[in-house]
Amino acid sequence: MFLRLQLPSVNIWWQTIDRLTVGLVLTLLAISALMVATASPAVASRISVENAYFVKKHIMFLAMGLSTLIGMSLLQESYVKWIGYIGSLATIVLLVLVLVVGVEAKGATRWLHFGGF
């Protein structure tokens, strides 16, 4: 399952990934963190939360996304395809579910309630 983990070193992993794409993704993530950091204090003060509230949330989701990116890059291609098919099917099911049991907000049915979310 984890074919690249069986390789002798991180250097080989680094040689097998598309470094340009990784660099561009990291650049976009850095720009997004900068944009959130500059815009969030004004919004946070307007809704009465601490100034760094949105920055902390954004950094948390960035960390989860990067972990997923690295984890997926370690998988064999057949597993990544299988996960993609399952994810696509789940997305279609959730979209249909919104039409059936979605919650209306401001005149549009766009959301599903999952516990406290």
Image (tube, rainbow, N blue to C red):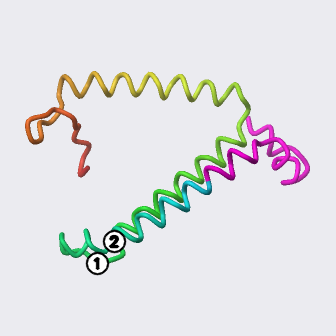
Q: Is residue 76 above or below residue 55?
A: above
SS class, disc 1: loop
Residue sitting nearer the eye, 100 or 50: 50
Amino acid type assigned to the residue bearing label 2 in the image:
Tyr
Q: Is residue 66 above or below residue 105?
A: below
Quarter containing the N terminus:
top right
Residue sitting nearer the eye, 47 or 32: 32
In the image, residue 15 lies in the stretch drawn in magenta: yes
In the rendered image, residue 64, in percent from the top left (x then y), is placed at 52, 55
**Label 1: how many residues lie within 10 Å, few (<14), some (14-19) or many (20+)?**
few
Left or right relative to 2: residue 36: left
Q: Residue at x 26, y 43 (%)?
A: 114
From the image, tell me which residue sits under label 2. Answer: 53
In the rendered image, residue 68, in percent from the top left (x then y), is placed at 58, 47
In the rendered image, residue 83, in percent from the top left (x then y), is placed at 57, 29
| C-alpha span from label 1 to label 2 | 5 Å
From the image, tell me which residue sits under label 1. Answer: 50
**Label 2: how many residues lie within 10 Å, few (<14), some (14-19) or many (20+)?**
some
In the image, residue 28 lies in the stretch drawn in magenta: no
Q: Which residues are magenta?
A: 1-25
**Principal secondary structure, stretch drawn in magenta:** helix
Amino acid type assigned to the residue bearing label 1 in the image:
Glu
SS class, disc 2: helix
Residue sitting nearer the eye, 2 or 88: 88
Q: Residue at x 11, y 36 (%)?
A: 104
Q: Is residue 35 above or below residue 106?
A: below
* Label 1 with label 2: CB-CB less than 8 Å: yes
- Residue 8 tag number: none
Q: Quadrant of residue 6?
A: top right
- Residue at the farthest right position: 8
